[in-house]
Amino acid sequence: DVKVTQSSRYLVKRTGEKVFLECVQDMDHENMFWYRQDPGLGLRLIYFSYDVKMKEKGDIPEGYSVSREKKERFSLILESASTNQTSMYLCASSLGGTRYNEQFFGPGTRLTVL
Amino acid sequence: KNQVEQSPQSLIILEGKNCTLQCNYTVSPFSNLRWYKQDTGRGPVSLTIMTFSENTKSNGRYTATLDADTKQSSLHITASQLSDSASYICVVSALNTGFQKLVFGTGTRLLVSP
C-alpha cells in the first residue's frame, strides 16, 4: 500500500513564525504535491515537484516555499506565518511520467495561525 | 476557465437508502475524471477513475458514470451505510504538455443518518 505521512496532524503557530510541514512517501514516487483545503474552495495546489531539487509553482504559491532534497520527502515552508494561512494542508504523491497517475494523499495537517 | 461544480453541497439520507451526487465540468482538454472520498480530518481516497471512452465504473456500492459529451458525471451510492458519511470530491484532469493538471470540485458533504 502507498503510504504518505505528514509530520503533524494539528499545529498551532503564532503570526510571524516560520513553519515547516513535512511530507514523506514510501512508494518511490517521482511527483509530490502540496495543497491547501478551505471550506467552499476545494483543494488548491500550492507547489509541486517532479524530481529531487525540482519545484514548480501551483495556483497559490504566494507566502510559501518548498524543499525537496530527497526523493521521498517534500517540505512546505511558511517563511512568516499569517492568519490567512490557517487551513488544512494536504500532501500527495504520484508516479512520474506524462500519463495520468493517481495522487495518493496524506492525512493532512490542520494548521492554525494565531 | 477550467471548473468543476458539484451538487448538492450537502445531503442527508437515511441508512440503507440510495443517493446520487452530481459533477459538471468545463475542463479542457479532458483527460480523465476521478471521484474521491474524504472522511472528516483525513486525506482524500480515490474511489473510481474514468477516461474519455468509459461511461460507467463501479467500486462495490459506488457506481460512477461519465457523459463526456455533456461533461457530466454522477456518483451513485447504493444501500448507504453510516460509514459512507464523508465528503465526495470530483476531480477532473486536464491534459497539459508534460503534466496533468487536476481541477477539484468543492465536494458534496454526505451524512448518512441511522
Image: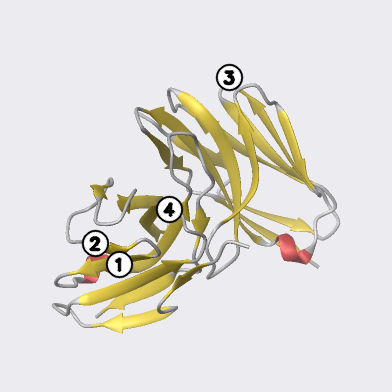
Subunit that carries the residue with mark 1: A
Asked whether disc 1 touches disc 2, contact meaning CB atoms under 8 Å apart, the reply is yes
Which chain is home to disc 2? A
Which quadrant: the N terminus of chain A?
bottom right
Report which residue position mark 4 lands on.
A40
Q: Position of residue B2 (x, y in %)?
A: 39, 31
Quadrant in which the C terminus of chain A is drawn: bottom left
The answer to whether B101 is drawn above or below residue B72 in the figure is below
Whether pointer 2 and pointer 4 mark residues with C-beta atoms closer than 8 Å, the reply is no
Q: Position of residue A87 (x, y in %)?
A: 35, 67
Residue at which label 1 appears = A75
The disc numbered 4 marks a residue on which chain? A
Q: Dot 3 lies on which element?
A: loop
The amino acid sitting under disc 4 is Gly
Give the label, 3 or 2, closer to the camera: 2
Q: Quadrant of residue B109?
A: bottom right
Q: Which residue is mark 2?
A: A66
Q: Which residue is nearer to you in this view: A81 or A102?
A: A102
In the rendered view, would you say B85 is above or below A112?
above
Determine whether, in the image, residue B69 is placed left or right of residue A28: right
**Distance of label 1 from label 3 (alpha carbons):** 40 Å
Cα gap from disc 3 to disc 2, whole angstroms: 39 Å
Q: Residue at x 70, y 26 (%)?
A: B55
Estimate how packed mark 3 is, as few (under 14), some (14 to 19) or many (20 or more) residues with alpha carbons within 10 Å: few
Q: CA distance from mark 1 to mark 4?
A: 26 Å
Residue drawn 18% across and 77% down?
A18
Find residue B28 and report its horizontal and vertical position in percent. Answer: 43, 24
List the residue tagged with mark 3.
Answer: B70
Q: Mark 3 touching mark 2, by CB under 8 A?
A: no
